[in-house]
């Protein structure tokens, strides 16, 4: 009878210890900040590994590498600052995308990561264990849905004498378009 009492006490204490060991909420390694209808910034949290690679995979299956460099390797990603100090545009026609952020403790070649992502494109969730990468690697997956926004304003091409000669490819100048030729002041 005392054995059963001890066993029940151990199970009760073990269950309480397991409940106390659970973390309240997994802190995100990275944050997605919407900067426009179809643009976003990717901001690493404090304490992440120093290098990262960014990829998106759209609902239509298009995979894009966002962190392109001449060497085609991961880049330095500072905490609390947008990756590459820029915002990234997601094509609206491709629909919702999954954003994959690969953090690593050393610079990683981007080509093999892209190929592995392509091979895993049908997998619902990609983890660091799925990848064949050197060193320590963490993968964070986020979602972003681009929305149709206002059309971009590109401005006009200014020719000699300050006259707008074209609209930068957005429509016709002078033929009912929204561009008006600019005449220089003669003071």
Image (cartoon, grey):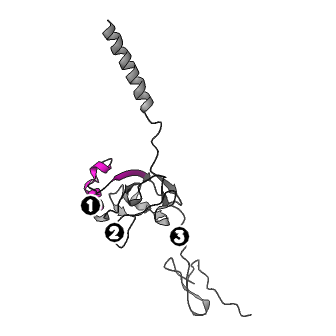
Residue 12 placement (x, y as % from top left): 39, 19
From the image, tell me which residue sits under label 2: 72
Label whose residue precedes the other's in the sequence (2 or 3): 2
Query: Marks 3 and 1, Cα distance to the nearest angstrom?
Result: 33 Å
Residue 49: tell me if it is visible: yes
- Check the image and report above or below for 175 versus 5: below
Q: Nearer the viewer, mark 1 or mark 2?
A: 2
Q: Which mark is residue 152?
A: 3
- Check the image and report above or below for 95 versus 172: above
Residue stretch rendered in magenta on the structure: 114-142
Label whose residue precedes the other's in the sequence (1 or 2): 2
Quadrant for residue 96, please give it.
bottom left
At mark 1, the secondary structure is helix
Q: Nearer the viewer, mark 2 or mark 3?
A: 2
- Check the image and report above or below for 26 versus 20: below
The C terminus is located in which quarter?
bottom right
x 45%, y 54%: residue: 145
The N terminus is located in which quarter?
top left
x 30%, y 64%: residue: 109
Q: Is residue 109 left or right of residue 99?
A: left
Q: Nearer the viewer, residue 79 or 32?
A: 79
Residue 44 placement (x, y as % from top left): 47, 55
């Amino acid at each position: 009878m005392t054995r059963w009492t001890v066993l029940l006490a151990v199970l009760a204490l073990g269950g309480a210890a397991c409940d106390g060991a659970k973390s309240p909420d997994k802190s995100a390694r990275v944050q997605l900040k919407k900067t426009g209808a179809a643009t976003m910034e990717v901001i690493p949290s404090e304490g992440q590994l120093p290098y990262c690679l960014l990829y998106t995979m759209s609902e239509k299956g298009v995979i894009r590498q966002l962190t392109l460099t001449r060497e085609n390797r991961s880049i330095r990603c500072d905490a609390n600052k947008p990756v590459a100090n820029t915002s990234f545009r997601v094509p609206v026609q491709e629909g919702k995308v999954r954003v994959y952020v690969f953090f690593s403790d050393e610079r990683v070649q981007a080509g093999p990561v892209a190929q592995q992502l392509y091979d895993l494109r049908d997998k619902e969730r990609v983890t660091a264990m799925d990848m064949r990468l050197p060193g320590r690697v963490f993968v964070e997956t986020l979602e972003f849905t681009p929305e149709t926004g206002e059309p971009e304003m590109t401005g006009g091409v200014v020719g000699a004498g300050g006259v707008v000669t074209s609209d930068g490819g957005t429509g016709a100048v002078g033929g009912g378009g929204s561009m008006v030729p600019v005449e220089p002041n003669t003071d």
